[in-house]
Image (spheres, coloured by chain):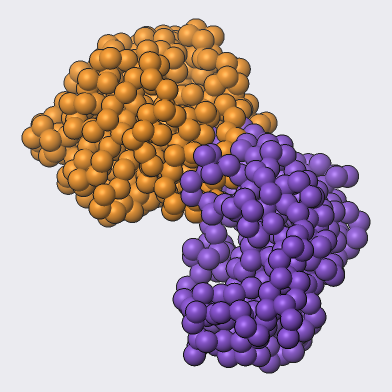
Chain colours: A purple, B orange
Amino acid sequence: MAPVKNGRHLFKEIASGFPEPGKTTAYDETQTIDLEKVPLKGGMLVKILYISIDPYLRFRMRDPKEEKNFPLFKIGEPIDSHAVGRILRSENTKYKAGDHVYGRLPQEQYTILAKDADVTVIQNEENIPWSLYVGVAGMPGQTAYVGWRHFAKSKKGDTVFVTTAAGPVGATVVQIAKAEGLRVIASAGSKEKVDFVKSLGADVVFNYKEEDTRKVLQREGPIDIYWDHVGGEILDAVLENTSLGATIIVRPSLTYSIPSNLTCRPVYRHSLIFERDITIYGFRVHVIMSPEDRDSFYKEIPKAIASGRMRYREQVTKGLENAPQVLLDVQLGKNEGKSVIEVARE
Amino acid sequence: MAPVKNGRHLFKEIASGFPEPGKTTAYDETQTIDLEKVPLKGGMLVKILYISIDPYLRFRMRDPKEEKNFPLFKIGEPIDSHAVGRILRSENTKYKAGDHVYGRLPQEQYTILAKDADVTVIQNEENIPWSLYVGVAGMPGQTAYVGWRHFAKSKKGDTVFVTTAAGPVGATVVQIAKAEGLRVIASAGSKEKVDFVKSLGADVVFNYKEEDTRKVLQREGPIDIYWDHVGGEILDAVLENTSLGATIIVRPSLTYSIPSNLTCRPVYRHSLIFERDITIYGFRVHVIMSPEDRDSFYKEIPKAIASGRMRYREQVTKGLENAPQVLLDVQLGKNEGKSVIEVARE
């Protein structure tokens, strides 16, 4: 068989504001790949099916001179994110052709994984859409599930506040908290998102563009557990309306990285952390997730999705060529549900 | 015996900036007390010896409309703080005349404690100065000792950064961290303070007014454990120079409450809490201190002081009439060591 086109989503230059399609990242079709003959050196050839476009990817477009810890994208190479692919050929005895695998993979149509690559084989016994394995059944769902499990330490009667509650992490947190019988206050940025979050059973849901978060929390608080996706002035409003001993779990979403690539909107009320015995947890899910966390996640969540108990919103865009634009849309909050690119269906 | 004068340090009005001597608080001599006849109703009559003047007292001068959680001072009544007194008469069988007691007591020369008052009898077997029981052997020392014990979770090879390291909390943290064999970076605001902190064994000590904290931390970091007394731009500089998984213990001192009575200097780099898996602990020592914490503190610290292993700086001002001015001096950072008022020697 002749070589085929291997479309790639490349990192082109360090971002200074929002990523610009075609400039910060760009779709490229110049590479070809011979699917039958390309040498695997003990690894595997994977056809990418679904890739995740996440707010946090913006963090990875910074200057390596300014950021030493966070793994940054390399100029001229495909960006990477969580993805589901199907193995076409394998020289690794742990994986076989036909397996569906999940992991952080380069954004290209076909990719070769080294022989020491660590990806998760997804059985999908529940037969849910493969795209969900990069969303509610993937990293965002794990973020909510594992973060809550490690840090929330909820008590009966607690009041929880969740921002960007219609997003894949926020909506999962809302549903976990409601399943524990807690009172949930949630905010989102459109009528449609608010309606979705209400349908998840949240007790108080408001559009933060129409209602002042501080006033809602003054009326409905105090807050015992805050799942923070936004930082800045909203974090201040929450700090002012916390109970003693409150817990804050920070998972900055897009507004954390605006307006510049370095600073967030400022927080002024951090003395309340001391005055109210507050604990703040920052975490990246791959750092804290134990094998037990992972097992119980895959045991519970796909089943809950299949049965309709765990709900989600998803926006699937077809074609890797659209990835640069979707990347910007996610930063602008234009997406209606978890953003996924369908690179191929099967 | 005729009634005697009972000088009191009264809260006069809600503060808007720094407390003004004679305006925000004032010394008052209009009250008298008959030490032999004043009815105790099952309680005790205590002669106050040493009182603590702490930065956090400013937090307690706010408007009750704006602050519901923190115990505020009441207008027209003596302010209170940690103090050591001697019991003159007792109708409570748990305490007897002659006992020295420690607790949060009204700032007046003589005070009557209700029968359910909960104060700690200090034996002082080591015969250290009584004033130290409101300093390194009192609440500030407990803050350092118990906060470190609960939250620091230090590992071999950790680098610790301590701000206001010549203060009673900071200096104790420096000494605890050095006793654990950790590397300690510390900052203070004068040559004399820097010299004192160096004498405690800290590895890198600098005057934050002369050297840029950010540059020092870039050179000497990354920081694994930060004991935060200041917030604001220094917290940002630390956040930028943390290791992955760093711990921040926030104990805001004076600059947290400046310039207004509500807001702090802003923090912009809070997205790093997420990016670097950082945990931030705020606490008030009386909330977290267990009976075991308290026992081991009183078992260890007075001995360490008596032996010279635990060092401190102390500034004792004689006469309760000076309390309003000392209160301001502490907010301005003018004190040279833990500020204590000697109300009476014995």
Q: Position of residue A328 (x, y in %)?
A: 79, 51
Q: Is residue B262 left or right of residue B49?
A: right
Q: Nearer the viewer, residue A10 or A278?
A: A10
Q: Residue furthest right?
A: A191
Residue B311: name its quadrant: top left
Q: Nearer the viewer, residue A66 or A25?
A: A25
Residue B98: name its quadrant: top left
Residue at 49% in and 65% down: A288
Q: Position of residue B67 (x, y in %)?
A: 62, 34
Q: Is residue A160 left or right of residue A286?
A: right
Answer yes or no: is residue A78 visible: yes
User: Is the N terminus of chain B in the top left, top right, bottom left or bottom right quadrant?
Assistant: top left
| Number of marks drawn | 0
Q: Position of residue B208 (x, y in %)?
A: 39, 21
Q: Nearer the viewer, residue B248 or B65?
A: B248
Residue at 29% in and 54% down: B155
Residue at 45% in and 36% down: B238
Q: Nearer the viewer, residue A37 or B13?
A: A37
Residue at 75% in and 54% down: A26
Residue A135: name its quadrant: bottom right
Q: Is residue B224 left or right of residue A37?
A: left
Answer yes or no: is residue A282 visible: no
B276 w.r.t. B58: above or below: below
Q: Is residue A288 left or right of residue B128?
A: right
Q: Position of residue B296 (x, y in %)?
A: 22, 50
User: Is the C terminus of chain B in the top left, top right, bottom left or bottom right quadrant?
Assistant: top left
